[in-house]
Amino acid sequence: MNRKTLIVYCVVAALLLLGVGSLFYVLFFKEGDSNEPYIAISDGISAIPPDAITLFESEKLEKVAAYMERGGAFDTFVEMLPEGSNDWSAIYSLHYSSKNRVSPLLVVSIPEDVDVQMLTNKIERKCSGVFNKKYGDNMIYRSTVPDISFSVYGNFILASESIIVVESSLRHIENQTSIEDDALYGSVSGVKHNNEVLHLNHNNLGKLFSGFVYKDYLKYAGFAQSFADWSTFSVDNQPNKSSLQGKYNASSEEANYVNVLLTQKELKSDIYSLVPNHCKYLCLLSISNIDEYLEAYSLYLESHKKVKDYNYLNVMAQKGIDSKVSTFSFIKSLKPEQISVFAFDIDSQEKRVLAIKLKDSSPLGEAKDSIADFIYKRYIPEVMGQFFAPTSQEKYFVNGDWAFIGGAQEIEYLYKEQKNEFMFNLDDYLSQTPASEHLDESSVASLYFNLNRSSDSLSRFLKAPYNAVFKDIVSNENFECAFVEIVKGSGVLGTEIAYYHEDLATMPAPLRVPEIEQSVVLDNTVVEVFEGPFVVKDFRNGSTNYLEQRDNNDLRLLNSAKKGVWTIKFDSPLCGSVEQIDYLKNGKLQMLFCSGSKMYLLDRLGRKVGKFPVSLGKEVLLGPNVYDFKGNKEYVAVILHTDNTIAMYNLDGSKYPLWNEITLGETIVSLPEMITVGNNRYWVVRTAYQTLIYKSDGTLAAEFTKKRRLKKDTPVEVISSKDVVVTTFDGREMVLNLDNGSFRKR
């Protein structure tokens, strides 16, 4: 993982998961763990003011510095410390310094054999634009470069971007008060660590929200504060996985939400096999005893003076339908075992679906094997909490023990997918990744996030510049997911929080696809590759230009009169396509093309742009075709490789995460044609033998076997929001319903 940011950015990202998922900040505990009291790693803990929101302890400064933004003030300041300081212990904490502003404090412990005054003088000389400020009997140095305030007191170096925070630290050292005086800090026992520990003061997390999160989302701060009192995590960073493990401290049996979850038992779930593979996030709560859960939840709300509003909203919800059944009676009659909410995109729109595993589905109605209207709108979210509200509550269906509730579009899509025996589900997807270790876990609650697919949604919670930093973190690898498993021990609750940033060579693809019956395999088919000249536009005046490749492979641009503008040296043939894109998003166009196994981008003067060329890992036969699905100039490129595989890439050369590569036994003769049917995209793939139609994610839209095999040159005519007309091998015109994959005569 490319750690370009301070640990605070990681904390903020986790807090968003808390706010979105309502279950994130509890700590890890299992039977048999040690009950030894936690002992601070560094004596610098005595310099941390009691108002700390979070603090990160390490026995080595270099461990703390690894999380600091490269080239930032703290990074520069640490580089000014003497050789050997990387082995000094350090603490990095966050404090509320002014209105809606959170500032860090770095406390470095100085070994006894170091001359403190000499050290102070050396740091001062290395800084630029330093002025001194007397604070009591102590001196604070304010530096312009780096932009930081620092002081040396006893055997501690104190540094912060805010002089107020440095003053606070000095004041508390003088008064011999610190975070250690908090009765709940350090009371956590049995925390095993590798000399890196992260503490969270839940009572102060609201300040962190105010500093980093847009005001529209500050409503989540209350839940974060009441979840527990203190949490202590051990930090484990591996090459492709980062995890947090530890324990929590909750002083109130009623006011802390962790104790609500303690009333329930751990259960296994099959929900991952019923959810589309492109799911963005999924939250699951086990409800082994609904009566105990609701009783504990009511006490939790009552302790926060919210139970009156809670009861009122539930009464109002039941007035919305012609039924005298109360919201609470309805929920209890379902005998729920698990409740889940998950989200996925349909036509670039996020849709949330509510799923409930039931012992008795009869109170819902008679919707076995069919979609029906859902009349109990608001009932479940009002009782269980608004986090469990789907995008809308129009329709539902029951599949086995699970009921699915949501809007008409997403419910119809999900119903069709689950009826497809070849559905590529989330279980199939994750089973091919390192995160598969979580699929068979029993838990009280769990949370899954595909951070790549959710980065746009999650970044909206954060203020600038942290939203951009967060998106940058999750855009570097092609598999980024977070898993939270909440478990129970002997009267305690805890979790492991795991973040996978595995750079998978091949993205997970469907394991179960219908085998295409092949009576003919044409391995000797020659695929035509257009050699040019390629028509391009001069963005300055709109005139037509031409890019041609000469016999020696050199590239030459011709103007509208076909006179040479420039010629550049080039070594290998182009792959039949040149696309113009506004890569820099400034109204200017560049030329994108492939050659060999690389993708190139040239500006109008023939100069390579940015980090291009980028390697695709294998030889290109045809392409690229370029698409801007969201209309935001975040382009993707569709490529046909020489190994007879259709792939889709981001322009940095990484695999597009929502695409399953198409590979066939017969020769693919052209790039796929994209068609729009209703609100959905489909791909028409033509081989030397037949035509196939794929969904937007690269999975088959229907079974094209036997009498359903399509002619290789069949037109695909869109006639409705779900139907196309195609021609089969025997010459019959058929209507193909792309929603359910069925055929009928025209």
Image: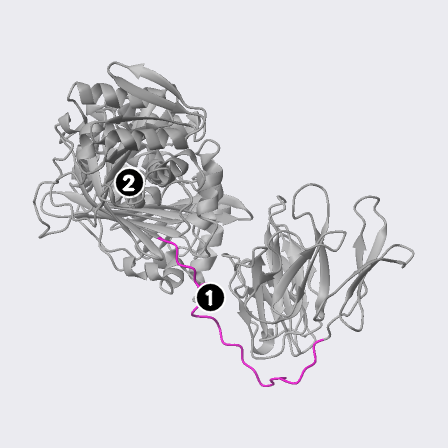
Q: Name the residue under label 2.
A: 23
Other-residue count near label 1 (Cα within 10 Å), few / some / many at <14 / 14–19 / ≥20: few
As displayed, is residue 158 above or below residue 171? below
As displayed, is residue 95 above or below residue 61? above
Magenta stretch contains residue 518: yes
Going by the numbered disc 2, the residue's amino acid type is Leu
Image quadrant assignment for residue 714 = bottom right
* Residue at 12% across, 45% down: 190
Image position, residue 283 (x, y; %): 33, 46
Q: Is mark 1 on a helix, strand or loop?
A: loop
Report the quarter where the C terminus lies.
bottom right
* Residue at 10% across, 52% down: 31
Is residue 643 shown to the viewer in this render? yes
Q: Name the residue under label 1.
A: 506
Main secondary structure found in the magenta portion: loop
Residue nearest the viewer, comparing 116 with 215: 116
* Residue at 44% across, 34% down: 461
Going by the numbered disc 1, the residue's amino acid type is Thr
Residue span colored magenta: 500-527
Image quadrant assignment for residue 334 = top left
* Residue 131 left/right relative to 741: left
Q: Distance between the residues labelled 2 and 1?
A: 32 Å
